[in-house]
Image (tube, grey):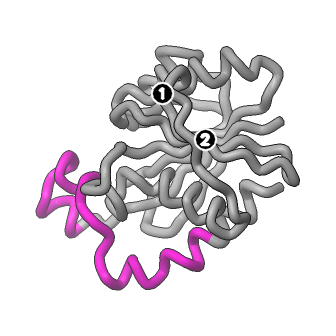
Amino acid sequence: MKIIVGFGNPGNQYNFTRHNFGFLALDFYAKVHKLTWVEKPRMKALVAQDSENDLLLVKPQTFYNEVGQSVQAVTSFYKDADLLIVCDDFNLPFGQIRFRERGSAGGNNGLKSTIQHIGEDFPRLRLGTGNEPLRQQLGDVNFVLSKFTPAEHEKLPEILGEIANFIAK
């Protein structure tokens, strides 16, 4: 089994924000594959099972900076599963997708939390949300909590399709 954890913040007010790109990617995959989200309080997450592709999609219901708690709970329960983290990265240009087998947090608080709870030896798919003029204008905290611009929003279906294909591999 492969566990795919998308990072984001719970709550409708965070829908389509840059920090919720991981949630958005998993929601897109779940919709395409007609999967249903189920609450798993013990894992502090919503999960969707894709039996056909042997995947478990996970959306932690802690806030972004504490997602490691949920990742640890899920990986402790599914000990032999492979893990993939899907998160946003404002240091990458919008729409760029970068896969790494392991590495540092690179300033991402969700990755810092995950590393704190399970170590740094896990693959991650980083989704570029970069928009340097807007980031300079808003500052980092407000930037990651900002919505995608209309031009970025138009490109999301294509980007989310690429991510869904990567996840299904």
The percent position of residue 96, horizontal first and vertical second, equals 54, 65
Say which residue label 1 marks.
44
Q: Amino acid at mark 1?
A: Lys
Q: In the figure, 139 relative to 42: above or below? A: below
**Total count of labels:** 2
Q: Residue furthest left?
A: 137
Q: Nearer the viewer, residue 71 or 108?
A: 71
Q: In the figure, 147 relative to 84: above or below? A: below
* Disc 2 packing (10 Å; few <14; some 14–19; many ≥20): many
Q: Along the horizontal axis of the image, is 62 left or right of 47?
A: left
Label 2 secondary element: strand
Q: In the figure, 112 relative to 53: above or below? A: above
Residue in the picture at 49% in, 59% down? 24
Say which residue label 2 marks.
47
Q: Which residues are magenta?
A: 133-160
Query: Quarter holding the N terminus?
Result: top right
